[in-house]
Amino acid sequence: MAVQPGSLTLVQAAKDGDEAAFEVLLEPLLDQGYRLACGFLHDHQAAEDAVQEAAIKAWRKLDRLREGSEMRPWFLGIVANECRSTRRARWWTVLKLDHPEAIEDPRDDAILEGVELRRALRAMDSAKRLVLVLHWYLDLPLDEIAVITGSSVHGVESRLLRATQELKRRMEVQRGRP
Amino acid sequence: MDDLSLRNEFRRALDVVAPPAPWLAANVRTELRQHRGERVRRRPFALTLSPAAARLLAIALIVVLMLAAAGAFLVIHRFVLQPIPIHTRTGAVSRECSTGTTDMITTQVGWQGTSRTTDGGTTWLDVSPPAMPSAGKGGGDTCVLDATHAWVTVAISANNTCPTGCAGPEIDRLYVMSTTDGGATWRTSQPIPASGMSLGVEYDFFDTLHGWLLTDTGYYAPHRYTRDLYATTDGGVHWNHVTSASSRDGSVLGTTAVACTATGITFSSVTTGWLTWDCTQGNGPGLPQGNGPQLAVTRDGGRTWAAVNLPSAPYGCGATPPIFSAKAGVLLLSCQGGAVVYRTGDAGQTWTAGQRQISSQVASQVDFVDGTTGFYFEFDRAKKVWTLYRTTSGGADWAVVKSGLFPGQNVNSLQFINETTGLATVSNSPVPWVTNDGGKTWSLPPPYRSVGNEICTQPTDPGAGSGPRAVQMFSRTTGWAAGARRTTDGGATWINVGPPSLKLRSSASAEFFLDANHAWVVQTAGSSTACADRAVVFSTADGGATWQQGAVVPLANPGVGVWVDFLDAADGWLIDGSQLYRSSDAGRTWNLVAANVGMSSSCIAFGPMAFSSLTTGWMQVQCRNGGGLAVTHDGGANWSAQILAKSSCCVSSVLPTFFDSTNGMVFDDSNGPIFAMTSDGGQRWVRHGLPRLSYFTCVGKGGVSQCSNQSIAALSLINPSQGWALVTNDVTGRGGPFALTVEHTEDGGRTWSSVEADLMKVNAYPDPSQTTLTYVDSKVAFLWIQNRLFTTADGGHGWTAVQITYR
């Protein structure tokens, strides 16, 4: 009989080519990956595409996940890269939402504020947008954001502070406040 | 605004654009299965690169990236996320050419950008035009007219930069590539002088000769750009400038929908054309202007344009190009929470909104066959099913065609080729579902099969490929490989001697080769009510010349997989994830030994078994907290966890192999090499020595550790004392080439000596899971490495590559 490669953990099993083990690892992360992509792209169809593409890339690159490393920041980092690529590909062409943002009742402040925040987010550069979504929307700790963005915790803190200030400024401008 | 308020506002704002996607996990699973086998297993860099080599590699990568950036090109790519699927203009129907998403011309022939299918979407062939200098292959903006006529734009950018305030890189010139033979050959147009900061390109062909192309160039911040319209009358070879408009000249064409995203252009005759925009979205930092959809019309071939009023248009909708048949036409507005269909009966002079807002999720779930007849899918969030509606009045009224379709899935797109034949791309299916009765019933094209909502996975040949895999040689001449391939001439010729395929066969399968003649192949199959609910074991005692079909074995966990193991020609075990069966008549009949062999409810049997006697055997299991080995000492009725060997970090879960009922071995190199042996049937395992490797101190992200440029790729023992190891050595420490050497032991691993072998070097790291070393005796051995087979007849000194014939 040929010696069969084996595994101790799911990660090892997945690295050995066990697709089912990889799915077990990945599925709990899909929702956060999807929410990250939606928050970044504001387009749920594109977000689904980005998460699917990220899943395939994660499968292909699983060997690069170092022993002892956390799967979540590694996968979310791939999703973020995929979102950036998607946005780069679309940036200068047509960006179309499946659900164009209607404001049917301008008195509905909740909808209005949502629109303002999304518009403000879209106007910001991708690095700032990413830390904003990861921190304020996904509630991830700074050290995990640092892993996802490939920077230091201190760098994330600084970028988050600047991005939050810029976001608030942009929202206030849109609301007509100084 | 405090942190809590801001966090709540993020949720409120972004939850709207992140609707639940319960089908996502299924979609990902489907995608992964389609990409199975694409993963490139490679050696971790920490093991292969010295710090100096890593620095050199990093510098080289930077240089390559800089060169790539300097030579980067730009390919015009219009992005319209899942637009209404577009057909060819058959008969009197006029619509925009297909722009990149899946578009089936017939049930068999279709396009997906510049990929083309002729088998209903089962396989797609990239028929992209060849790359132009300074441009990449594919990726342009496609326009598909029919089964054979298509165009794709290519933009050349000498300087792929984006100054402050721009919305995209600057392009120098634009080309249109055209094919009239389904992508077999392409012709390049004369250059179109679309220089400047490109914001987008829209183009359309009315027929095989007449086309129009609109470019937006300039800057969105501040709003300063130019729209140029070109036309061709020779199928896209020559383009003539028709008109030009500027955002500051006051013209309708120049000032309509400034900063909005253009969604299409379509010509319903050689004089009448329509331009549409979505002003809820814009490009660049400038905010979109305007309220709702924008539509403009030309009735003089594009020279002049007039804005079109859509009465009672809801705020915040995006228009998609209209579809006409004679004077009847429809135009779709995608709005928040649904869509509105406008219709015209006077060739677009006046438009009337449908009274009902159809609540399809995206525009791609709506499709019009012509200017009056259309279909759309609506999702019932409570029941999680889809309902298909139909209109024959241009959207004035809709009738239910069928409810309860595709439960739990997402309908990504819908396309009707005519009033009766349609295709739906659904999240759980690798190919579109097809209807031939106007949407009442849907089915998958053969060979695909579905049971209820479940798509049955297709069986695959484990031996598919150009050469043998998982080679097991049992004598100097005879061996087996994956997919029931067998050789009788020392590996030169491999023939598929497998059993016939069951009807309604499913994807799970297993095989076991006991010796040169005895083998078992397990196939799984389904029924009208299940994709897979039974297994059948085929056995051969004459090397595959004849196969005996065993009794049907009911499956409890067909999705997990099946595995089979035989101790001798009569005694074997079969497992499907939890149910263990036993046969004592060579696989003809099977009896249930245990209904749940996973040790506990949190574990499942998840891999092959290895029995060393009628009572003792091992099995790979997968539990919530990791995987491992389970052992039985009562023939499979009861199982418990067992650790055979442990490296510095990890426990091996590789199955043991046995020379006889008492002596066995286990070797695992997945976390540093470990080698253990037993002489009491597996009760006690003792670590044995391996060839000594050279280690050096290295620093990775995990801190300081010991690295080696060497590894043991394979180990083969012919008895508890005598064995050989294949050692790989990254001689330069730069990730290859790898030198291969053979080490020999005659005392069970206590001492090792090098065999003076003339093995070749390999450029890539030899994946241990794809490397097999088999000594059939002290002289004859086979080495299967990187899809090549080598053999030796002198114990490993001289190796000869075997020329393989594989089928």
Image: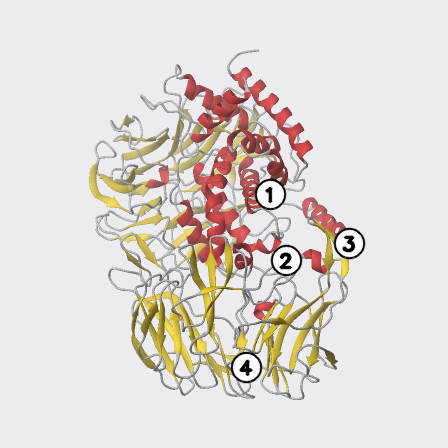
Q: Is tag 2's residue or tag 4's residue first in the polypeptide sequence?
A: 2
Which quadrant would the N terminus of chain B be assigned to in this image? Answer: top right
Does residue B744 lie above or below B525 as drawn? below
Element class at badge 1: loop
The disc, 1 or 2, on the residue closer to the chain's N-terminal end is 1
Image: B803 above or below A96:
below
3 or 2: tag closer to the N-terminus: 3
Closer to us: B114 or B677: B677
Q: Which residue is mark 1?
A: B74
What's the distance in space between the residues labelled 4 and 1, CA to CA? 63 Å
* Rendered view: B188 above or below B78: below
Q: Amino acid at mark 4?
A: Phe
B610 lies left or right of B206:
right
Q: CA distance from mark 2 to mark 4?
A: 28 Å
Q: Mark 2 — on which chain does it sit?
A: B
Badge 3 and badge 2 in a common chain: yes
Give the residue number, with chain letter if any, for mark 3: B51
Q: Earlier in the sequence, mark 4 or mark 3?
A: 3
Q: Earlier in the sequence, mark 4 or mark 1?
A: 1
Reading the image, the residue beneath label 2 is: B649
Q: Whole-percent x and y of residue B235?
A: 46, 48
Discs 4, 1 touching: Cβ within 8 Å: no
Of discs 4 and 3, which sits in the foreground?
A: 4
Residue holding disc 4: B659
